[in-house]
Every structure is written in structure tokens, then in C-alpha cells.
């Protein structure tokens, strides 16, 4: 099972790209994951 996008994008400095490239690559490889990425917009972090 793949790590959740919210977990991949959480933490670090607010202006850090962190693991953004990994998330983008995952969505490009599996467009159905776009909804999970969109839901990160509503995260408290």
C-alpha cells in the first residue's frame, strides 16, 4: 500500500516542496489518485 499523500506532504517548512515531486509522479502515473491529492487541500496542516 502506498503512503498517503497527506503524510507525504506534511511537516517541514511551510515553503518547502518536500516530497511534492513524488506525489506529482504518482498522480501522473495513476490519474485516479488525483482525488486523494485534492482532498489534501482541506487538511489542517
Image: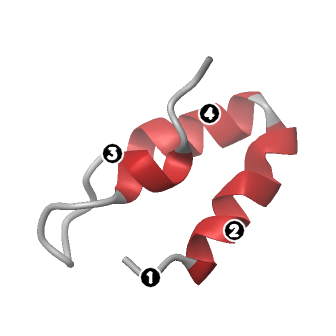
Measured from the top left, where is residue 4 in percent x and y? Answer: 54, 41
Front: mark 2 or 1:
1
Give the residue pinned by disc 3.
19
Judge depth for marks 1 and 3 and give the one in front. Answer: 1
Secondary structure beneath label 2: helix
| Marks 4 and 2, how far apart at CA | 15 Å
The quarter holding residue 40 reads bottom right
Whole-percent x, y for residue 29 in the image: 72, 28
Marks 2 and 3: CB-CB under 8 Å? no
**Spatial CA span between label 4 and label 3:** 11 Å
Instruction: Measure how far apart labels 2 and 1 are at the Cα level.
Output: 11 Å
Q: Which residue is mark 4?
A: 26
Q: Residue at x 38, y 56 (%)?
A: 9
Q: Earlier in the sequence, mark 2 or mark 1?
A: 2
Residue 20, can we see it? Answer: no
Residue at image mark 2: 39
Rendering quarter of residue 28: top right
Q: Earlier in the sequence, mark 4 or mark 3?
A: 3
Relative to 12, does residue 5 appear above or below in the rendering?
Answer: above
Going from N to C along the chain, the mark reached first, 4 or 2, is 4
Between marks 4 and 1 in the image, the one whose residue lies nearer the viewer: 1
Where residue 39 appears, x then y in whole percent? Answer: 69, 68
* Mark 1 or mark 3: whose residue is earlier in sequence: 3
Which residue has dot 1 on it? Answer: 44
- Real-space CA distance between mark 4 and mark 1, rounded to the nearest whole angstrom: 23 Å
Instruction: Give 44 or 22, whichever is nearer the viewer.
Output: 44
Q: Secondary structure at mark 4?
A: helix
**For mark 2, does the 10 Å Cα neighbourhood hold few (<14), some (14 to 19), or many (20 or more) residues?**
few
Q: Position of residue 45 (x, y in %)?
A: 37, 77
Earlier sequence position, callout 4 versus callout 1: 4
CB-based contact (under 8 Å), mark 4 and mark 3: no
Amino acid at each position: 500500500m502506498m503512503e498517503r499523500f497527506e503524510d507525504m506532504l506534511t511537516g517541514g517548512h511551510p515553503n518547502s516542496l518536500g516530497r511534492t515531486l513524488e506525489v506529482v509522479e504518482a498522480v501522473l502515473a495513476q490519474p485516479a489518485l488525483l482525488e486523494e491529492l485534492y482532498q489534501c487541500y482541506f487538511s489542517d496542516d
